[in-house]
Image (cartoon, helix red, strand yellow):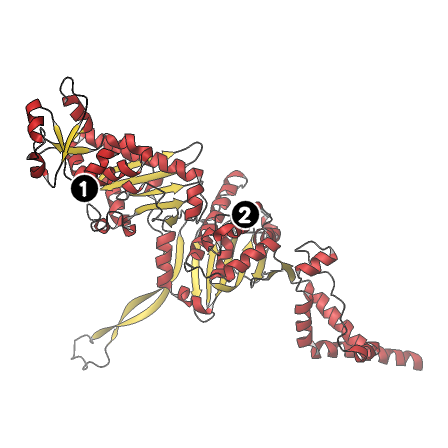
Amino acid sequence: MAPSIHRAQSSSFLRAAMVLACCCLAPQVQRYLKWCFTLTSNHLASGGVAVGHKVARLAPIRATAGSKHRRRSQNPRHRLKQQAVADVADAMAQDVENFEFEAEVGKVMDIIVNSLYSNKDVFLRELVSNAADACDKKRFLSLTEGDAPPEPMKLRIQTDKEARTLTIEDNGVGMRKQDLINNLGRIARSGTANFVKELGSGGGDDVSLIGQFGVGFYSGFLVATKIEVCSKGFQDPEAERKTWRWTSEGGSFTMQEAPEEALFGEQSGTKITLHLREEAQEYLDSGKLADLLKKYSEFITFPIELWNEKVQYDQVVDETAPPPKEGEKPKMKSVPRSVFQWEQMNKMKPIWLRNPEVVNSTEYSEFYKTTFKAFDEPLTTTHFKVEGQIEFRALVFIPTTMPFELTRDMFAEAGRSMRLYVKRVFINDKFEDLVPRWLTFARGVVDSEDLPLNVGREILQKSRTLKIIRKRVVRKVLDSIDDLRETEPEKYDQFWSSYGKYFKVGLVEDLDYKDELKRFVRFFSSKSADNMTSLSEYVSHMKEGQQEIYFVTGEGKRAAEIAPAMEKMKQKDYEVLYMIDPLDEICSQS
């Protein structure tokens, strides 16, 4: 019996020792695990392990103290502690998986995190656009593969000033575990490679290329030191759907199941939490977020709700007032009270998506005044859709009066207001290549289905799609002005009085549209009195045998009329054009 009792006591001692080792070494275990589970590309390459594979076993403990360490390793109690650490590590490894970003993604991350790019606002546009795309995809899958309609889809944005976090959540299609790894960690597609190549060929650290190559998610690191993504995929059977958490601070990422994470979407969804940098605390201000959402995402199809603070006033008894007399009510006062509630940011519907046949002039006028902060009525309205090789919609207005920003400088950048959208996401309204310089005064919207998000000026200059869009827009605008010239001469006179000089510049600068613009140009002449005449009208008035168009320059109509050369022209009864604007003579030479 004595040997059995001794063995039992030894086993009890060993179990107690293991428990004690686990408790005492908890901090060391955590530091050790952090070292063991941080994979580097060098480790993976040398071991032949594919990037993103789960670490199944701990690396062997390395000797760092020479012979002293070897003597300790031979100690049975020390080996017991090592085994306890390994057992705890194996258990914890079942919950958290560690991954490295692929090399190309890592370079993108490094560029973004260390970029000096000033317009960090783009991150919100990119993440909101991604969320809207997720909702679109869920709607499509529900229609094509689902048996039941999807829940009403929307986006929600909320800040936590104490935790310094900004959360963007949607109840779109969501992502499964492998989707999170593939979409956020690998992106083993040509897009990222092209992004890196473009930066290496002269793009520098221009983060305006984000979105061009499908790496818009990483723009979150412009303002965040850490990003957490919790997502539940719609494509799994409902009973098998799980919520997974993806976490990264820029160098690597971890994956683990997150059953405790609450998403507002019942079927699926994604929640992105940004832990903001010290210099990005401005994005905790709901006013700042509201302005950005109205600027970039005003026409997103799905509702965007912002958790916003509102002030409400409650009526309470004024205790400082004299007591009321018998039969009178006590004096009341208003006391402000802050309440938080969801407020929809994108209430305006994109009018350009509607059929032009069902939109009336009042709706066009309201949209024009609201969107472009105008006080006049539009002189012309051009609304059309192009389908086929490329797809886009456009709505272009010509103001009745010259926009104020152009009154001092006819080509002022602030006076440009052709708004470029990509799938209802605002991109820019200052691109010079969307319409020619001689249409600077036009106001409008172009919404493309084919251009990438966040296109830079260099990309636009090379874009075949943009060249087609530009050509179609110019063609339609010129057609509308032509209709005005033929059907409403008085309005055309008003147009020419305001914008004629732009077309004269176009005649000089734009060889592609030189012949097109000739038919619009008008001048005073010796036979038109107070009216103006076009070149085609002049030709129709030419005398028999007259081969040339005659003009005379002067510092005004009166000066041209009394020019010495006019005596001979009057004798021949030839009509002479008066070129009294500095641009007129240059036009005649072109």
Question: Residue 310 sits in which quadrant?
Answer: bottom left
Identify the residue shown where x is 18% and y is 33%.
522
- Structural crowding at the residue carrying mark 1, measured as other residues with C-alpha within 10 Å and reported as few (<14), some (14–19) or many (≥20): few
Q: Which residue is mark 1?
A: 582
The earlier-in-sequence mark between 2 and 1 is: 2
> x, y percentage for residue 102?
62, 55
The span from disc 2 to disc 1 (Cα, nearest Å) is 48 Å
Above/below status of 192 relative to 224: above
Secondary element at tag 1: helix
Question: Residue 98 sits in which quadrant?
Answer: bottom right
Q: Quick one: quadrant of the C terminus? A: top left
Identify the residue shown where x is 16% and y is 26%.
538
Mark number for residue 463?
A: none
Q: Which residue is mark 2?
A: 194
> x, y percentage for residue 224?
49, 63
Front-most of 405 and 548? 548
Callout 2, which amino acid?
Asn
**Answer yes or no: do the residues labelled 2 and 1 have beta carbons within 8 Å?**
no
